[in-house]
């Protein structure tokens, strides 16, 4: 069985969540598997092998798990990109559209220094709205988003291409058809 097949087998699909028509790709089952977590983190590390980054940024909540583990493997620090109102210090905020609503994320105003190369991590890329918000925040701080990695791509929704259109290298480990 290939790595992508192993990962896909560990991901649970929940129909009509959080609203009718959405096929929610739940990675909690993948994270419960030691092999699944290892394959995901190692796969993302391998996808960006040879690149030099200064920090890893992870988008709440599952991007924290994967991004924190990847930062550890790469020997880098970690930037949490959180939902509005969750960070205790001075923040920058960015709204974004989800496939099922509007939300916003924040980052500490001192999360990175100008010119630092950042690797952005989340579990899934769908429409790209959350990742675009993360990129916008890092760029507002003067950071350079030099790569974005995701376990899952939903290519029909076009998010990975939207991120590439921002000049950011995108790597994903598996794809799922549909929404």
Image (cartoon, grey):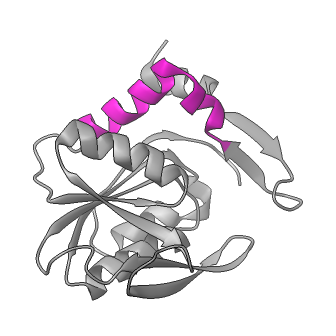
| Vertical placement of residue 2 versus 167, above or below | above
| Residue at 44%, 22% in the rendered image | 3
| Residue at 16%, 43% in the rendered image | 75
| Vertical placement of residue 158 versus 170, above or below | below
The percent coordinates of residue 153 (x first, y second) are 52, 50
Among the 4 quarters of the image, the one containing residue 169: bottom left
| Residue at 12%, 50% in the rendered image | 51
Q: Residue furthest front?
A: 88
Is 146 left or right of 41, judged from the image as shown? left
| Vertical placement of residue 152 versus 18, above or below | above
Query: Is 131 or 68 nearer to us in this picture?
Result: 68
Magenta stretch mostly in which secondary structure? Answer: helix
Look at the image and give the residue range highlighted in magenta: 26-46
For residue 47, say whether it is visible.
no
Q: Is residue 38 magenta?
A: yes
Query: Is 42 or 23 nearer to us in this picture?
Result: 42
Is 169 left or right of 174, judged from the image as shown? left
The percent coordinates of residue 65 (x first, y second) are 46, 45
| Residue at 19%, 50% in the rendered image | 76
Number of numbered tags placed on the structure image = 0
The percent coordinates of residue 131 (x first, y second) are 45, 68
């Amino acid at each position: 069985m290939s790595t992508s097949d192993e990962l896909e087998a560990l991901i649970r699909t929940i129909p009509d969540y959080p609203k009718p028509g959405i096929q929610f790709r739940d990675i909690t089952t993948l994270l419960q598997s030691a092999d699944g977590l290892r394959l995901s983190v190692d796969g993302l590390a391998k996808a960006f092998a040879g690149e030099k980054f200064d920090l890893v940024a992870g988008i709440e909540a599952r991007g924290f798990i994967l991004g924190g583990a990847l930062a550890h493997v790469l020997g880098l620090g970690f930037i949490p990109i959180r939902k509005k109102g969750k960070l205790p210090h001075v923040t920058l905020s960015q709204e974004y559209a989800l496939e099922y609503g509007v939300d916003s994320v924040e980052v500490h105003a001192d999360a990175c220094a100008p010119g630092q190369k950042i690797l952005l991590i989340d579990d899934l890329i769908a429409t790209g709205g959350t990742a675009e918000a993360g990129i916008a925040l890092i760029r507002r701080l003067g950071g350079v988003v030099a790569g974005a990695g995701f376990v899952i791509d939903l290519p029909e929704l076009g998010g990975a291409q939207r991120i590439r259109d921002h000049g950011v290298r995108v790597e994903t480990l598996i794809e799922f058809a549909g929404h």
